[in-house]
Image (cartoon, rainbow, N blue to C red):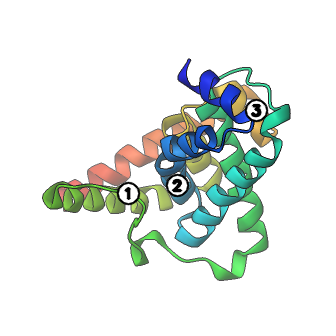
Amino acid sequence: MQDMLLLMRCKQGDRDGLRRIYEKYRDGLLILAIALSHDVNISEDAVHDTFVKFAGSVRDFKLTGSLRAYLAACVANRVRDLIRTRRNQACSLEQHRLSSVDLNDPSRAVICNEQLERLSSALAGLPHEQREAVVLRAYGQMRFSAIAKSSGVSVNTVKGRYRYGIGKLRSILNGEVRK
């Protein structure tokens, strides 16, 4: 309901409404993009490009579902586009820190960063299609049908990729724990 009110404000030209939408979803979308691309630069560009495009078309925008899922699908599509055009400039997440995540407690920040790095390296071990299905479902909170539509494959294919991806993640993470 809050998203609907913010969208109405944006359609009326209120910049504060757009700013609040950006602040509400920015960090989650950045984490989603990083999980998909393993490149902070591509991720930041994808989130930025998504919000610029969203801001330009907000007057004609009609929300039919979750704003978060819509923005997540846009970011995932933009990440795919940027990866295609920047294949030679790939950087791994392990070389970067998440500067956009604001955690006030230093010990919590260290724990969170360690967990993100561990999860990121586990996600990197998955094939791209499985990683995309897992990340869009878990972080993007998208339905399988929306993922299938955005990926151009069947719902059953997405469900299979998700199931196999989760299984591989478990085995990778359990393997790291035993070391």
Considering only vertical position in the picture, is 18 above or below 45? above
Which corner quadrant holds the C terminus? bottom left
Foreground: 126 or 143?
A: 143
Query: Which residue has dot 3 on it?
Result: 11
Question: How would you rate the neighbour count of disc 2 (Cα within 10 Å): few for under 14, some for 14-19, many for 20 or more?
Answer: many
Task: Identify the residue shown where x is 50% and y is 46%.
Answer: 23
Residue 53 visible in the snapshot? yes
Query: Which residue has dot 1 on it?
Result: 101
Q: Is residue 101 found left or right of 22 in the rendered image?
A: left
Marking on residue 2: none
Q: Earlier in the sequence, mark 1 or mark 2?
A: 2
Q: Earlier in the sequence, mark 1 or mark 3?
A: 3
Query: Which residue has dot 2 on it?
Result: 30
Q: Position of residue 66 (x, y in %)?
A: 63, 25
Task: Identify the residue shown where x is 18% and y is 54%.
Answer: 108
Disc number lying in front (1 or 3): 3
* Badge 3 amino acid: Lys
Q: Quadrant of residue 109?
A: bottom left
Q: Are marks 1 and 2 in contact (CB under 8 Å)?
A: yes
Task: Identify the residue shown where x is 67% and y is 38%.
Answer: 14
Foreground: 55 or 141?
A: 55
The Cα atoms of the two marked residues, 1 and 2, are separated by 9 Å
